Amino acid sequence: MTPDVDTLARLWPQVGQVAVKDGCVYVVAEDFLDPLVLRGQLAAELTDEELPRHVVQVDSLDPADLVAPDDRYGAYLPPRDDTERVLVRVWERVLGVPKLGVLDDFYAVGGDSLAAAGLAVEAQRVFGVAVSLAAVLRHPTVAALADEIRRSRAAAPLPPAAVGVAHPLSPQQRRVYLAQSRDPASVAYHLPLVLPLPADVDAGRLAGAFRHVIARHDVLRTAFGTEAGRPAQRVLAGVTFELPEVAAPADAPVPVSPFDLAAPPLLRAELRRTPAGPELALELHHIVTDGLSLALLLREVDARYAGRDLPPVPAQYADYAAWVDGRESPGRDWWLARFAAPPAPPRLPTDADRPAGDEPAPTAGSGVVEFTVDAARTAALRALARREGVTLFQLLLAVYATFLAATTDGAAMGGAASDGADVTVGTPVAGRGAPGLDAAMGMFVNTVCLRHRVRPDAPFRALLDEVARDVVDAFAHQDFPFDSLVEAVLPVRDPHRHPLFDTLFAMQHDEVARVDFLGRPVELAIAPTGQAMFDLDMQVYERADSLRVHWAYHAGLFLPATVRAFADLYLELLDAVLADPGRPVGALTGARAAADPAATIDIDIDL
């Protein structure tokens, strides 16, 4: 139902006259008014059903001027399913336009080739399916692009793997399995988290919902070991899952302890009764899940708890593992050319010497520094990303590359004659390019190693453009297993550091990091395990009006005060880029930061 004239006049003080006819709103004003801005003002108070199909600026309210526009172009149609709802949020975030409809044209709302590249990157990250730049340009509305994504998901499914036999591990699983085998007591690959529950939660019904989902997804009933001398996995017909109820103090951590990979399910849960209310403590092993799978698990448990039926699972993880084992990895030539000359190990300014020797040390302890990028900074960063035609992820990554260059190669950053720093950063990608995997559980996420040349005399804007292109190219070749790249370009490895990169940068969007669970939205923030996989691991959680950063670090190399100073420096770099993105990269940190990255800056950091 379209709102009445009085409501429109109140919400649009800049409009002189307004009329409503056949679901369309016509406005008269002295200045040109952007209909998308007008619609955004309405969206703050009105429901989707109340928003007008069109907002049209006319010269007068003479009936002859009130011509209905063509519904094929620009009619407001709200998202109709989850794919369109998520895609609308991606478009709004990248384009900076509020309350987009699924028929709004990409070009009409200010899109260009750079924005299209950003949309392709973000859609791949969120949906876990291949979305090319060409697909965005060929399908310039949310409705059309959503159809393309649905077609990708509905393509010929993977051939089912044989039942009752052992299957090879996927490249992602093999990496985790070998690391766990070297240090069986390690919990570095555990994913613990705590979720609030409603006061009247039914423990029996919740346990039954978990059992139903475990029965649906073979990977949650899979045992890992070796067969014929090779790592292998075997699906068991049934496993035992219990949901004990325990009394616990408020804010108690998840008691993390090693899993036996041969004894599924590699999932533990307990229902805690705390003074603050009930909560669910969960712990899974990374070999059977990733971030998208964790969100899927909770959505399906939520559905079964509510008594809703679930559609059949289109593909099981063993289908994927068998399929990927029998195909040639795409993107090999591109990655080998990119790393024809392997990068030198970075020189992070550690507080202690790195262990030496040929034998790998036990998994290192870790610490975490947390801080918030406030609402004002976040809004300014989003606006800058839109002006530069990049995504917020690409902008934050470029600043992170600048941080690494300043801390690992301060001398190179200080002089204009330098070639700059060769910076490598790892980032996770969804790895779900095959059809049918969006509704499958398992460890699909791959890691790509991004490589940037950070030149001190180049404007930051030039570095940002380079980083944006590198991200697009790397994501286009994301299916090449990271371990295959390491084997090809780094035959001799240091057992005390991660190959090719020592630091990870990841960004979690609301679409992945938040789910509705038992009647309330919950954030899937993985709790610290106390063990480190990387020297530095920055996880950025995007919220509606701010960014929350969890920066984990190798506690054997860094003191907490050093990482707090790193956080200060990163925030200082964000402010410097916001003040002048055309400034030379080497001038962003100032002489103090290049000479002493651990210098204290007066910014509050929450531990």
Image (cartoon, rainbow, N blue to C red):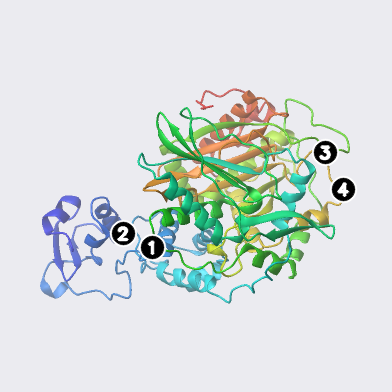
Tell me: 409 left or right of 436.
right
Q: Position of residue 167 (x, y in %)?
A: 73, 64
Tell me: 584 left or right of 489.
left
Instruction: Please name the amino acid that badge 1 sits on.
Output: Val
Are circles 2 and 1 on residues that touch, CB within 8 Å? yes
Tally of numbered discs: 4
Instruction: Please name the amino acid that badge 3 sits on.
Output: Pro
Q: Earlier in the sequence, mark 4 or mark 1?
A: 1
- The residue carrying mark 3 is 360
Q: Earlier in the sequence, mark 4 or mark 3?
A: 3
Measure how far apart labels 3 and 1 are at the Cα level. 54 Å
Which of the image's four quarters has the N terminus? bottom left
Q: Position of residue 193 (x, y in %)?
A: 53, 40
For disc 1, the neighbor class at 10 Å (few under 14, some 14 to 19, many from 20) is: some
- The residue carrying mark 2 is 36
Measure how far apart labels 2 and 4 are at the Cα level. 56 Å
Question: SS of the residue at dot 3?
Answer: loop
- The residue carrying mark 4 is 492
- Of circles 3 and 1, the one toward us is 3
- The residue carrying mark 1 is 109
The image's mark for residue 331 is: none
Which residue is more in the foreground, 429 or 176?
176
For disc 2, the neighbor class at 10 Å (few under 14, some 14 to 19, many from 20) is: some
Question: SS of the residue at dot 4?
Answer: loop
